[in-house]
Image (cartoon, rainbow, N blue to C red):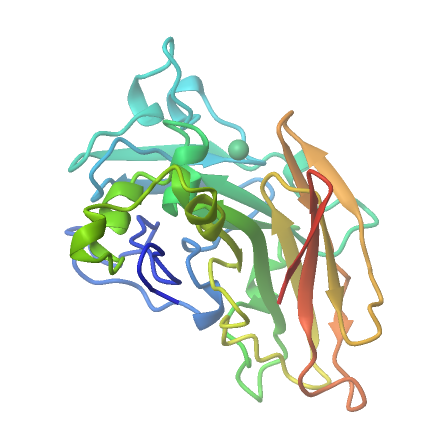
């Protein structure tokens, strides 16, 4: 709740959004379950991905993709030696990223037909992600993309496999570019208080937001898979060690896959998960994260 010295559950964010026109006026339709995430970049092994990135935010940003192959100018990761090209795109400018999708990005022989990766802005490291600039990609075996849909429920007469993705992330709003603005405009301090006490441990703790696709307190909507239809539910993370659980019995299907040095992803990607009559209906979907010996539960 927004009250006194606390910001509450609504924060200003910068987010990746997809446009359907060259002038970046009309946004593409997007599944409700995406929440805060940017558009899902979908590609098959062997494809070349091109993303025209227009920075409409107030700081330099980029797109750094996991799982793709790129040249240095297309890495989307700024450093003192690497602040050229697509690694640090200033506000109101455009960069076109070109990424290759090599075989190693795609599913292996024992994997389902698609695998998920994440992408994020990486000019100031975690500050970019905590400001909201994060999304995901799905890489398919050749010929598989057209057999899947992110629009759930899928059209009744199609035989498309439904596919959704959830990113579990603890957003440290204290490290967002917008923390000063949020503290100023989204609190209700009294005249006597003058300003928000940014060093108050309670304030700092209140800005650690445990979300699924950026939505808090079970408010992620639109995960409406169809009974009896094939589905794939990708579970990804950026940096925390996570356990996701489906259903009331706490049955956990976990696999962990590590990539890069600093990122781990929890790859709970069950092949062709079928939703049966007995398994349909509401079920609790939550996540436990073990961070510095604290047990945190997302719902
Ligand atoms: Cu990364």
> Residue at the location (46% across, 48% down)?
202
Q: Is 222 rendered above or below residue 1?
A: below
Considering depth in this image, is 279 or 169 the residue closer to the camera? 169
Q: In the image as oriented, which residue stretches furthest toward the front?
A: 192
Quarter of the rendering containing residue 128 = top left
Taking the image as shown, residue 262 lies to the left or right of residue 288, namely left
Residue 110, position as x, y percentages in the image: 84, 49
> Residue at the location (26% across, 31% down)?
60
Q: In the image as oriented, which residue stretches furthest toward the top?
A: 81
In this rendering, does residue 134 appear at all?
yes
Q: Is 125 rendered above or below residue 150?
A: above
Task: Name the image quarter holding the N terminus.
Answer: bottom left
Taking the image as shown, residue 239 lies to the left or right of residue 25, namely right
Q: Is 198 rendered above or below residue 269?
A: above
Taking the image as shown, residue 227 lies to the left or right of residue 185, namely right
Task: Name the image quarter holding the C terminus.
Answer: bottom right
Taking the image as shown, residue 72 lies to the left or right of residue 232, namely left
Considering depth in this image, is 226 or 169 the residue closer to the camera? 169
Quarter of the rendering containing residue 7 = bottom left
Q: Is 268 rendered above or below residue 92?
A: below
In this rendering, does residue 121 appear at all?
no
Residue 228, position as x, y percentages in the image: 73, 85
Residue 111, position as x, y percentages in the image: 78, 51
Residue 266, position as x, y percentages in the image: 70, 47
> Residue at the location (39% across, 47% down)?
132
């Amino acid at each position: 709740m927004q009250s006194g010295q606390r910001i509450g559950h609504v924060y200003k964010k910068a987010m990746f959004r997809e446009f359907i026109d060259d002038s970046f006026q009309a946004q593409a339709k997007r599944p409700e379950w995406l929440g805060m995430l940017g558009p899902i970049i979908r590609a098959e092994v062997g494809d070349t991905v091109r993303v025209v990135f227009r920075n409409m935010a107030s700081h330099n940003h980029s797109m750094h993709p996991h799982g793709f192959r790129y040249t240095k100018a297309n890495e989307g990761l700024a450093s003192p030696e690497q602040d050229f090209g697509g690694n640090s795109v200033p506000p109101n400018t455009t960069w076109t990223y070109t990424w290759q999708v090599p075989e190693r990005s795609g599913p292996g022989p024992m994997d389902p037909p698609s695998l998920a990766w994440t992408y994020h802005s990486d000019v100031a490291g975690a500050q970019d992600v905590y400001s909201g600039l994060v999304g995901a990609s799905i890489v398919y075996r050749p010929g598989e993309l057209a057999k899947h849909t992110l629009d759930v429920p899928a059209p009744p007469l199609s035989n498309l496999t439904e596919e959704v993705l959830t990113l579990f992330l603890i957003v440290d709003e204290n490290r967002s570019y917008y923390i000063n603005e949020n503290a100023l405009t989204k609190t209700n301090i009294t005249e006597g208080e003058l300003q928000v006490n940014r060093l108050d441990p309670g304030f700092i703790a209140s800005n650690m937001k445990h979300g699924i696709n950026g939505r808090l307190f079970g408010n992620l909507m639109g995960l409406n898979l169809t009974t009896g239809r094939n589905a794939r539910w990708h579970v990804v993370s950026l940096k925390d060690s996570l356990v996701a659980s489906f259903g009331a019995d706490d049955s956990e299907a976990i696999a962990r896959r590590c990539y890069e040095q600093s990122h781990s992803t929890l790859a709970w990607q069950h092949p062709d998960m079928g939703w049966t009559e007995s398994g349909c209906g509401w079920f609790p979907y939550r996540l436990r994260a073990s961070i510095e010996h604290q047990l945190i539960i997302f719902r």
